[in-house]
Image (tube, rainbow, N blue to C red):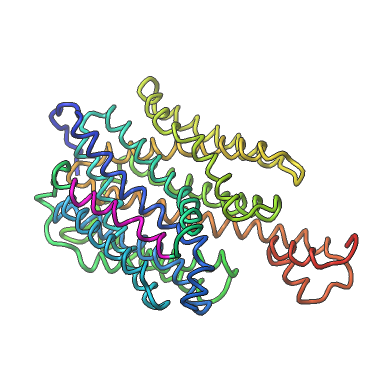
Amino acid sequence: MSFTTYTPQPPAGRREWTALAVLLLPCLLVSMDVSVLYFAVPFLTAELEPSSVQQLWILDVYGFVLAGLLITMGSLGDRIGRRKLLLSGALLFGLASGLAAYARSAEMLIAARALLGIGGATLMPSTLALIRNLFHDAKQRGKAVAIWSAAMMGGIAVGPVLSGALLEHFWWGSVFLINTPAMVLLLVCGPLLLPEFKNPAAGRFDLPGSVLSLLAMLPMVYGIKEIARNGVAALPVVALVAGLLAAAAFVQRQRTARHPMLDLELFRHRGYSVSVLMNLLAMFAIVGCAVFFTQYLQSVRGMSPMEAALWNLLPTLAVGGMAPAAAALAQRMDRAYVIAMGFVIAAGGFVWLSWLEPGSALWFVLVASSVYASGLVMVMSLGNELAIGVAPPERAGSASALLESGTELGGALGMAILGSIGSAIYRGHMDDALPAGLPAGAADAARETLAGAAAVAGELPGRA
């Protein structure tokens, strides 16, 4: 495939920027739904009484389905029309939100969360692909993608805070109902503001490729999360290997299919392949560090979940302007230098965090977290813009979906690998720190997590 030089298009005006504001709604809500249940779990557990396995599925099924269907939905949008897919997904997301809010059993809530994952998978690649169609000027597109990236990162941080605020006044289902008005607004404004675009030469939908992409992403994400949660075991390792084999079969299918879902020629363009890798690495670092940051605020500093969520929001607010700033800087100097600068800033933030001690002031960790988050947001926003910019307009949907899949996989890997390393180091130090004569059950709880150690320590007499 050759990359075609397109005729310059007129710059975007008020209509296009208003359309971007509409596109930010699904982006914000889909990323929020990853984290919005964190505080609601005790409330829905008391009412629905799910088993431990059902509780895990309530939390995880949304992310599993979302990750598994991104590539499929991106390719489908290129064929049937991105606006049509976006509006269909908005309708499904709104209806599934109502179903989840009024679920009367654990099984019903799991099914609703799965439907939310299907809806989310249609929304995410469609929003980024439509930005490619709305903003033809490279400078304007860079700003638009930077704003989109900031909204996506902001949604993940805002989710727990909004959830906690709603639960203070309403029942647990309210955390889902906030989606409905936004989806109604999207359904009303979308047909008026968003252009329709589909690839006229896309050919038939590749159903075997779709199944293989699902069989690749679902087991891989499941295996990584289970290893992060419970350590290495037979089932998650088998799932991980099965996912890798399905991924290899998917790539082979895309090489030989008459109408493939993904244009593998995209990876011959260095800008696209590097962007996917940068997104994966940046999300790997963000999610992996967030695991420890949350534990630090709650288990070391003794904050309540709501208080921890509010303090966790500060670094996000501090870096909110970094994505547009990076886009503006990339217009004045080589984008590669700005991306390298982002990685250096992030590395500086992580080095700063390595000096953190239990007695350090709160501002110390908040500023360090803001520094590393600023650098990674710079990297991700410019990577997204670069990847969408080099992809031909007719392939923007599948290109966006693959970019999002890399982001999802990076987050899962960050939680698994960095979380496992942290747990192993913690257990190694804890073995030497336990007081003599501690009951076996208490010792196991203290070795498992910092929260367990704090609970055990609270019951010990005197200096012990």
Which residue is outermost to the top?
332
Which residue is located at x 30 percent, y 63 percent? 118
Q: Tell me the quarter of the picture where residue 378 sits.
A: top left
**In this picture, is 372 found above or below 117?**
above
Which contiguous range is marked in magenta? 173-189
Q: Residue furthest left?
A: 200
- In this rendering, the count of numbered labels is 0
Q: Residue 152: x, y in percent?
A: 39, 46
Magenta span dominant secondary structure: helix
Nearer the observer, 360 or 415: 360
Q: Is 306 positioned to the left or the right of 264 in the image? A: right
* Lateral position of residue 355 relative to residue 403, left or right: right
Q: Is residue 252 magenta?
A: no
Q: Which quarter of the figure has residue 444?
A: bottom right
Q: Position of residue 25 (x, y in %)?
A: 31, 47
Vertical side of 338 occupied by 113: above or below: below
> Residue reaching furthest front?
169
Q: Quadrant of the C terminus?
A: bottom right
Image position of 454 (left or right of 33): right
Looking at the image, is 72 positioned above or below residue 124? below
Q: Quadrant of the N terminus?
A: top left
| Residue at 39% from the left image edge and 64% from the top image edge | 62
Residue 114 in the image: state x and y as whole percent.
Answer: 35, 68
Who's the residue at 17% across and 43% down the image?
Answer: 194
Q: Quadrant of residue 232?
A: bottom right
Q: Considering depth in this image, is 236 or 145 the residue closer to the camera?
A: 145
Relative placement, left or right, of 104 versus 459 is: left
